[in-house]
Amino acid sequence: MKRGTWLAVAAYLIWGLLPIFWKQLHHLPPLEILGHRMIWSFAFLAMILAHRGQWPAWRAAFKNKRTRHIYMGTGAIISGNWLTFIWAINNGYLVEASLGYFLNPLITVLLGVLFLKEKLRRMQWVALGLVLAGVAIPMLQYGRVPWIALILAFSFAFYSLLKKSGPLESIPSMGMETGWMLIPGLTLLIVLQVKGQGAMGHAPAADHLFLFLTGLATAGPLLLFTAAARIIPLSRIGVLQYIAPTLQFILGITLYHEPFTRAQAIGFSLVWAAIAVYLGEGLYASRKNQGMS
């Protein structure tokens, strides 16, 4: 159990600190970074699938039309999520991006109600109400929709919802997602190279290294998370997942000196209150069920 917890902590620490990695490429267009992330993620995952001897099962799954469509959809959604996150980091919106990942678990709960007809308890509705206030009040105060946070939260929530209907485990499923990304990624980079706008062959050696490492940066923490999820309870993962946006928030305020307005402080406070209510209610319900069994 301790090993699983440390694996999960390592995954979330990496995800929380990855903005430092993406900042090293801030001078490159986000679309070009995305193209490299698509290609090198697939290359990295392909090596893992080959090492595990999972290629035959992967090819068999690919022949299933429903499976192909599911992971084509998840690939498209997560690509949009990646692009938004990279753009946000490299344009000084890391604090708002972190809000998106604070919101995400509760938005996922909301989608479960809307699409899977899941039932919520009273305090879970209170938590969702606090989330709504946390987004609405700052928006009314400074007249701007926190679109980065909302895109990140909803895209990852829809990604999770669609992925839940897929038959593959984490690594093979992501291998199929990035397999669908391979052709768009290659096409994008080829067009940039033909136009003389691509970094490959023109940028400093450090840029080439960081672009190659986008695959490891994407799949590495996923491997740690997958290993952790097999051996620790989902409830513990639910608590640990807030490590990543907390680190992103701290980086945005302290390392990158992004502005943090009074309106944002109100919004974050309400969202943090919602998280506290949601986690506290879940813990209470879990203990109550254990007492009844």
Image (tube, grey):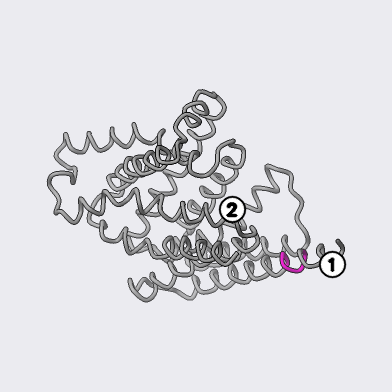
Secondary structure of the residue carrying tag 2 is loop
Residue plotted at (22% across, 34% down): 191
Check disc 1: other Cα within 10 Å, few if <14, some if 14-19, many if 20+.
few
Q: Which residues are magenta?
A: 281-285
| Left or right, residue 196 beside residue 162 | left
| Left or right, residue 76 beside residue 204 | right
Provide the residue designation for mark 2.
230
Residue 158, label in figure: none
| Left or right, residue 175 beside residue 26 | right
Provide the residue designation for mark 1.
291
Instruction: Based on the picture, tell me whether residue 127 belongs to the magenta stretch.
Output: no
Vertical arrangement, residue 38 with respect to residue 123, above or below: above
Quadrant for the N terminus, please: bottom right
User: Which amino acid, by three-letter code, is at mark 2?
Assistant: Arg
Q: List x then y, in percent, for residue 281.
A: 73, 67
Q: List x then y, in percent, for residue 11.
A: 47, 60
Q: Earlier in the sequence, mark 1 or mark 2?
A: 2
Instruction: Based on the picture, tell me whether residue 284 belongs to the magenta stretch.
Output: yes
Quadrant for the C terminus, please: bottom right
Q: CA distance from mark 1 to mark 2?
A: 25 Å
User: Which amino acid, by three-letter code, is at mark 1?
Assistant: Gly
Vertical arrangement, residue 198 with respect to residue 205, above or below: above
Number of marks present in the image shown: 2
Residue plotted at (72% across, 64% down): 282
Q: List x then y, in percent, for residue 71.
A: 50, 35
